Image (cartoon, rainbow, N blue to C red):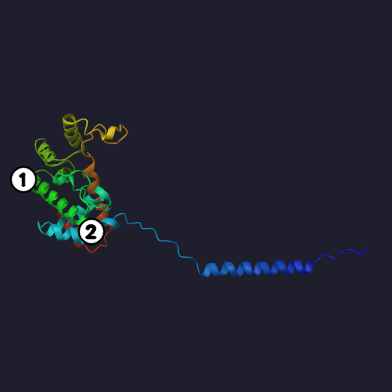
Amino acid sequence: MKKRRRKTGKTWVGLLVFFVLLAGALGYFWLNPSPLPKENSDPFTAVKKYRPLLQSELKKYRLEKYTDVLLALMQQESYGEGDDPMQASESIGLPKDTITDPKQSIQAGVKHFYNVLTYGNKQKVDFPTIIQAYNMGRGYITYVAEHGGKHSEALAKQFSKLQVKKNPTLYNCGGDKTNFRYPYCYGDYSYSTKVLKNVQLLVDSIPASGENKEKTGDAF
């Protein structure tokens, strides 16, 4: 009976071919790596597209220097998304999200900002109070003017609490007691803090030409 010979020669040839092909494939991908999708690290991309429209509208009130402030405010309101990016429907006496045209939203939002800015300057309150009033209304400016003229989250909570007492069924955070605002469910007492932080982040995201940063600094 003849013994079968092991086909060691063919086995080694097969392994050699396999490793040659493997090395070739690895070399190809090493020299031609697949491009990785670039992540958008700028959270203000959506609002920045509205810069020209905001500037144009602010120019009507000679308030162009507040462009970055309004962009930061829009970021807090909507991240630049939706048909009412300035969330300005309620500022003109309409139910929330009634506005369905971003241009109309910006027109109403800028007008609302102009009104609280004008009234705030007349009452000699600080700028954070004016920002907070975009969210809480002119009544907040009056309240702060009567309590030292400077905004604080403590004052915003007190004002919110007064408004809640007037209409507790409307301002109840949707009945959600886990909402960070509860029980101060009229407006967002931390609104000014968030918007002003957005201003700084937005300015830092702009290439350093000096012009924008200088104008934004003048806005305060």
Residue 213 in the figure: left or right of residue 31: left
Quadrant placement of the N terminus: bottom right
Mark 2 Cα within 10 Å, few/some/many (few <14, many 20+)? some
Look at label 2 and name its amino acid. Tyr
Residue under numbered circle 2? 50
Q: Residue at x 40, y 61 (%)?
A: 38
- Find the residue positioned furthest to the left: 122
Q: Position of residue 129 (x, y in %)?
A: 15, 43
- Find the residue positioned furthest to the right: 1
Residue under numbered circle 1? 122
Reply above or below: 171 against 59.
above
Residue 214 visible in the displayed image: no
Look at label 1 and name its amino acid. Lys
Reply above or below: 8 against 108.
below
Q: Residue at x 12, y 51 (%)?
A: 111
Q: Quadrant of residue 144?
A: top left
Q: Quadrant of residue 181?
A: top left
Q: Position of residue 36 (x, y in %)?
A: 45, 62
User: CA–CA distance between discs 1 and 2?
Assistant: 29 Å
Q: Nearer the viewer, residue 117 or 93?
A: 93
Reply above or below: 164 against 202.
above
Residue 202 in the figure: left or right of residue 34: left
Q: Position of residue 155 (x, y in %)?
A: 17, 35
Per the image, label 1 sits on a secondary structure element best described as helix
Q: Earlier in the sequence, mark 1 or mark 2?
A: 2
Q: Residue at x 26, y 51 (%)?
A: 75
Per the image, label 2 sits on a secondary structure element best described as loop
Q: Nearer the viewer, residue 141 or 58?
A: 58
Query: Which mark lies nearer to you, 1 or 2?
Result: 2
Mark 1 Cα within 10 Å, few/some/many (few <14, many 20+)? few
